[in-house]
Image (tube, rainbow, N blue to C red):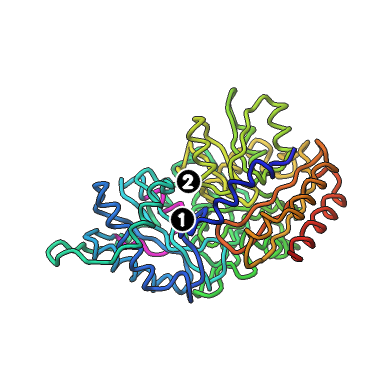
Amino acid sequence: MSKVAPLRKKEISALRNDRKFGTDGIRGPVTSTMNPLFVTKLGWAAGCVLKEEGITKVLIGKDTRISGYMFESALQAGFISSGMDVTLLGPMPTPGVSYLANSNNQVGLVISASHNLFEDNGIKFFNKDGQKFSEELEKRIESKLTEEMTAVDSINLGKASRLNDAQGRYIEFCKSSFTDLDLNGLSILLDCANGATYSVAPKVFEELGAAVKTISASPDGININQNCGSTNPDNLKEAMSGDDYDLGIAFDGDGDRILIVSSDGEVLDGDDILYVLSSELKEDAGVVGTLMTNKSLEIHFKNLGIQFKRADVGDKYVLQELLDNSWQLGGEPSGHIICLDTSPTGDAIIAALKFLSAIKNQEFSVKKSLEGFRKFPQTLINLKVDNPNKIIINDSFWSKVTDVESSLGETGRVLIRPSGTEPLIRIMVESEDSTKSENLCNSLAELALKI
């Protein structure tokens, strides 16, 4: 049955809370939500709260969007005013900052709006273990933001420094995690989304032996995620056509999401990748998906005796479920893949290397690796609305949702949820019949637009 009804109360509650933090840090337009004054105060507030925890140093990385320079300075000023020392990493994939936080026993921040276009920016926070901040810590920072900002005495101000070999350290980490992976003879096309992986990813795959070419690897501050990367796989498909590539790999702007394109143009999402990676799991293992995970994958795991649980949408919820169950593998259809045996957070480069390691005994054939797996058709519509809450609590809309659920029975699902990072309501219908799922989803979207 659908997960709609159990989620309704929780989703309404989330929408009514005036919170700065969403499902993945803080994010918004540079011209409004994410302005320099707010980011400076955010650095100060976070610094004050972290000092209460005995933390005195913070690492700051960023992706390639033009506003990153501005926010790097703003965060630096805010943290220093609270008495925190700052180490600037420069352009780094988000999981690279997570790795450095974990390996240096320091807190890490990433200035990034992930897969959004350059007009937006945001901040992601990692603790000393390289994992996303807890909700409790986020709430404490939000509470501090309501107070007046006051700098510490001059003698207690923090200092700033720069780590010049940050990218090199992350590259070596990725390579050293796969010492038995020989990519000689493999031809790969990388779509770097004009983002944070542009100089890191090619070196990792080349130094493991692959013949690598890149597209969208020339960031100018404005072209990040623009018609490229994991949110636009058609760009990679088109670039691969007519050339003899074994596969293509698309990252998002900050390098924590991945999609894979086979040599014949098939696009593999996070569910496909989890299917392949699950072949490496040991007995009694478990996998965490989300409310968006395809039902066919759940059935596959059940048939294999692999435990499976669904978390709320958002990689931090997947991570928490993994930790609670002492499991190692989880992810989302959007391409967040978490492999806790290697990395403490979702890491697109690590996930790609894991994928290649899993199919190496099949001569790196993507097609062979997916034999026997057929996903149920899903139709997902993202509606941009002023007030998602208004739709979700509307009785006539909910009555229609109930009717759709009844028509699907046990052969499909309905999911209604607000975005945690954008003013959107997401409507998803899944069924064995693609036409049926599309028609039902469209009918729900049409009703939502009238409310």
Q: Could you tell which of marks 2 and 1 lies nearer the N-terminus?
A: 1
Q: Position of residue 355 (x, y in %)?
A: 60, 43
Q: Under tag 2, what secondary structure?
A: loop
Whether the residues at callouts 2 and 1 have beta carbons within 8 Å, the answer is yes
* Mark number, residue 345: 2
Q: How many marks?
A: 2
Task: For the N terminus, give its image quadrant.
Answer: top right
Magenta span covers which residues?
A: 87-100
Q: Is residue 297 left or right of residue 155?
A: right
Viewer-side residue, 192 vs 224: 224
Viewer-side residue, 223 vs 12: 12
Q: Position of residue 145 (x, y in %)?
A: 35, 62
Q: Residue at x 61, y 50 (%)?
A: 335
* Mark number, residue 94: 1
Q: Is residue 307 left or right of residue 432?
A: left
Figure check: 420 above or below 368: below
Residue 172 part of the magenta-drawn span:
no
**Amino acid type of disc 2?**
Thr
Q: Is residue 197 left or right of residue 153?
A: right
